[in-house]
Image: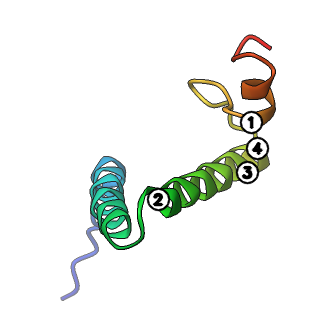
Amino acid sequence: MMDNQHPGQAPDFTNAAINMLGINLLWIFFVVWMLWGVLPVLMIALLINRFVEHVGDTRGITPIFGKLSLARMRAGGPEA
């Protein structure tokens, strides 16, 4: 006979996935730095930051530490 029991709630692996993303970014940045220098690492980091901010804006999510925009940095800091 078939057992009609439903499986329980799936485990939440969000924190583990975010941690592994950070670890992978760390070694990828290290390899890129060793091969091509720090400038490509900074450019990749800026692109990732822009992408994350774009996704946050699209979903209407407010960043915890505020948006880091180049315009505000040029204007004299986060207060501007």
Tell me the residue at 27%/53% (across/down). Answer: 16
The picture places residue 56, in percent across and down from the top left corner, at: 68, 45
**Secondary structure of residue under mark 2:** helix
The picture places residue 19, in percent across and down from the top left corner, at: 29, 50
* Mark 2 vs mark 3: in front: 2
Could you tell me how far apart the alpha carbons at marks 3 and 1 are, in whole angstroms? 15 Å
**Secondary structure of residue under mark 4:** helix
* 3 relative to 5, above or below: below
Q: How is the image coloured?
A: rainbow
* 53 relative to 31, above or below: above
**Secondary structure of residue under mark 1:** helix
Numbered mark located on residue 54 in the image: 3
**Type of amino acid at the residue the image marks with label 4:** Asp
Label 4 or label 2, whichever comes before in sequence order: 2
The picture places residue 13, in percent across and down from the top left corner, at: 31, 55
Label 2 or label 3, whichever comes before in sequence order: 2
**Type of amino acid at the residue the image marks with label 2:** Val
Mark 4 touching mark 3, by CB under 8 A?
yes
Residue for badge 4 = 57
**Type of amino acid at the residue the image marks with label 1:** Leu
- Which of the pair 78/34 is nearer the observer? 34
**Type of amino acid at the residue the image marks with label 3:** His
Could you tell me how far apart the alpha carbons at marks 1 and 2 are, in whole angstroms? 18 Å
Residue for badge 1 = 70
The single residue placed furthest to the left in the displayed view is: 1
